[in-house]
Each structure stands twice: as C-alpha cells, then as structure tokens.
Image: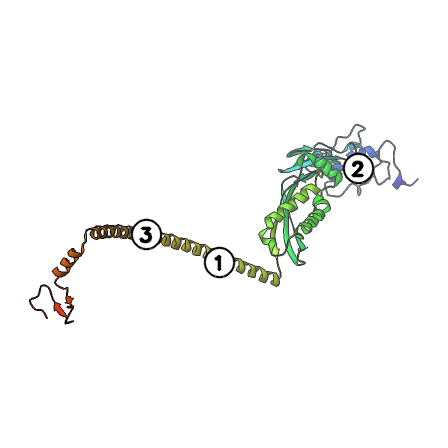
Amino acid sequence: MNSSSARSRTGSVVPGSSRSTMPWRLRIWNVGLKPMKRLQERDGSGAVDGQRGCGHRERNADNYNTGGPMKPSTFSRAIVLVVPILLMMYGCGTTVDQGKRGLRWNPLTAGLVKEPLKEGYYWHAPWNSVFEYDVRYQSFTEKVDVLTADDLTVHLHAAITMRPVAEEIYFLAQEVGHNWYAQLVRPQFLSAVRGVVAQYTMITIPERSSEIGNKIEAVMVESLKGRHLDVYSVALSEMEFSQMVLKAIEQKQAKEQEKEQKEFELVIAERNAEIARIQAKGEGDALQIRAEGEGESLRIRAKGQSQAQEIITKTLTPDYLKFKLYESPNSKMIIVPDKSNVPIIVNPGSDLSR
C-alpha cells in the first residue's frame, strides 16, 4: 500500500502519510480550526512541520484527535443565528399597505385563502406568499375614436373611476386576477363609450357631455354587475374636433348669440310698446274726461238757452218786438207809403230823417 494514501480508521496519522486520516465527522467541525492548526504547526524558525518530519505532524494530530466530541466554531454559531434572522426579515413576512387588501397563498396546503387581510404585517412560511389588491378608487383614462350620429369622427378622452370591492377580492382573484381592468373593464368601457356617443350629433356633444357620461356610467354598472367591482363615475375629460366641426360650432354659437340679442331687443320693444299703450290710454282717458266735461257744459248751456228762448217766446208780442226794434240805436226802419211809393227812412234815436 502506498504510504501517501495510507489512512487509519481511528483517525491517527500513519507514519509516512502526507494528510490526516481523521473521520469525516471530525473534519466538518475542524473547518473553523484550520488557521489555528497551521499556526501551531509552525516552529520557531517559521518552517512548517511538514519540513521537519512526520513525528511533529503526528504529535499535532494527536493533540486535536483526542477521541472526544468536537465543539462548533464561532463561524458556525454565527451562521446558525444569522440565517433564521434573514429568513424572518426577508422571506417570512409581508406588509399589507394602507388602502389595500391581501390574500394568503399557501401552495403546499390550502392554496388561496378566502379571508382578506387588512392593513398590517403578516408572518408566513418562506414558501408561502401574500397577494395584494388595491381597493382605493382609481381613475383609468382611454382615448376613443367615436363616430357620431351625423357620421363625423370625434376623438374623446373618457375617464372611469372605480375600485374592487374589498370584501370580494377573493372572488375577483379567482375569476379575473390582478389585471382586472385590462382583461374585464377596458373592452366593455370602450364599447359603452362608442355606443352612447353614437346617439348624439357632433355639435351637441360638448353641451351634453355630462348627460353622456351619466349614460355611459349606467351602462358600465349594468355590465359589471356581479363582477366584484364598484363603478363611481364616468366623465368625458377632453374632446378633439376637426377644423370643419370647430367652424360649425363657432357659427352655431354666433347664431345663438344673435338669437339671444334679438330676443332681448324684442323684450325691450314689447316693454316700450306697453309703456306707450299705457301713456296713450292715459291721454285718451284724459281727453274723454275733458270732452265729457265740455259736452256736459254745452248741454247745460244749451238747456239754459233753450229754456230762456222758451220763456222769451212765450212772453214776446208783436208790439213788444216793435218797441224793442224802435228802441235799438242800430236799427233802421223803411216806411213805404201806400200812395206815393216814396220811401221814407226813419232812424230811431237820430234827429235826422229822410
């Protein structure tokens, strides 16, 4: 047998051999003691005992191979302490953040646990994990090309605000998974936007955007019923029109402003006419009152004159009339004799006569 490969079953060094023959159990514990062993194998001149012969090497081996149990080194103890700490810090716990819910995933036992986890820190085995779901309201915006009722294309930015139902995330995870918006909501949202906007003309979309958003929201609530999702609102945030459409909108706004101006002028004219009617009625009433007063005065005057004439008529006699005629200074009498036909002019009140 070759001396370089000779080994003893008891762990002692065979003379002439070049390495220790201690059992493998002692070799494991002796890993941490190799540096110390090398220092002890050196002599005063600094040469290793491999250069001094096998006797010294055999003596050193006997010093360590006492036949008793070997104690673990400091490095082994550190590994035993550090490894569990690292596992606890990085592999055996999960933090569920604020506004989220978690689901335990135990692949070796129960699988996905039904009960949701609220905010906090949860311990688990290194081979288990926790799936988190954000249950806060989130807004998802889509740019949609829509064909209107008058066959014109509009570029809309539609936003939907929604969230998973916190108590139902287990069913959401089983039916859809984490990517629930892209897989479930987005296709139906785009379809709802196109379907509702197609009922309106191009010009009416801006002024009725709130109504359109409410209709889209109603469609989404109905389509996502029983899907463990809560729809909060739908809004049309931006609208992009072609130049032709913008020009048509400007013309419509100008017509509406002109119409409002005409309506305002009509109201002013009606008010002015009402004022004129009131003034004319007042003036007419005043004239009527004045005419009635004057007529009443004339009637009273005529009645007085009639009564006076009636009295005079009753009291006048031919002799009295002749007397009054003769008494008047302006009266003239022409007397025509019966025989000579020579007129004689008599002026009463005057001394001259012809």
Q: Nearer the viewer, mark 2 or mark 3?
A: 3
The residue identified by callout 2 is 56
Outermost residue on the top side: it is 68
Q: Relative to 183, say whether 346 is above or below.
A: below
Residue 137 position within the rendered picture, expressed as x and y whole percent measured from the top left: 62, 41
Q: Is residue 108 above or below residue 187?
A: above
Position of 331 with respect to 67 (left or right) is left
Sequence-earlier tag: 2 or 3: 2
> In this view of the protein, which residue sits in the foreground, 244 or 312?
312
Q: Bin the neighbour count of mark 2 within 10 Å (Cα to Cα): few under 14, some 14-19, many 20 and up.
A: some
Identity of the residue drawn at 67% across and 41% down: 221
In three-dimensional space, the C-alpha distance between marks 3 and 1, rounded to whole angstroms, equals 36 Å
| Residue 240 or residue 275, whichever sits in front | 275
Q: CA distance from mark 2 to mark 3?
A: 153 Å
Q: Which mark is residue 286?
A: 3
Please report the residue visible at 66 percent of the width from the left and 52 percent of the height from the top.
199
Circle 3/circle 1 CB separation < 8 Å: no
The kind of residue on which mark 1 rests is: Lys
Q: Position of residue 203 (x, y in %)?
A: 60, 56
Q: Please name the residue that numbered disc 1 is placed on.
A: 262
Residue 134 in the image: state x and y as whole percent.
66, 40
Q: Secondary structure under badge 3?
A: helix
Which callout, 2 or 1, points at the residue further toward the start of the chain?
2
- Distance from Cα at disc 2 to Cα at disc 1: 124 Å
Three-letter code for the amino acid on which mark 3 is drawn: Ala
Asked if residue 196 can be seen in this view, the reply is yes
User: Going from the N terminus, do you reach mark 3 or mark 1 first?
Assistant: 1
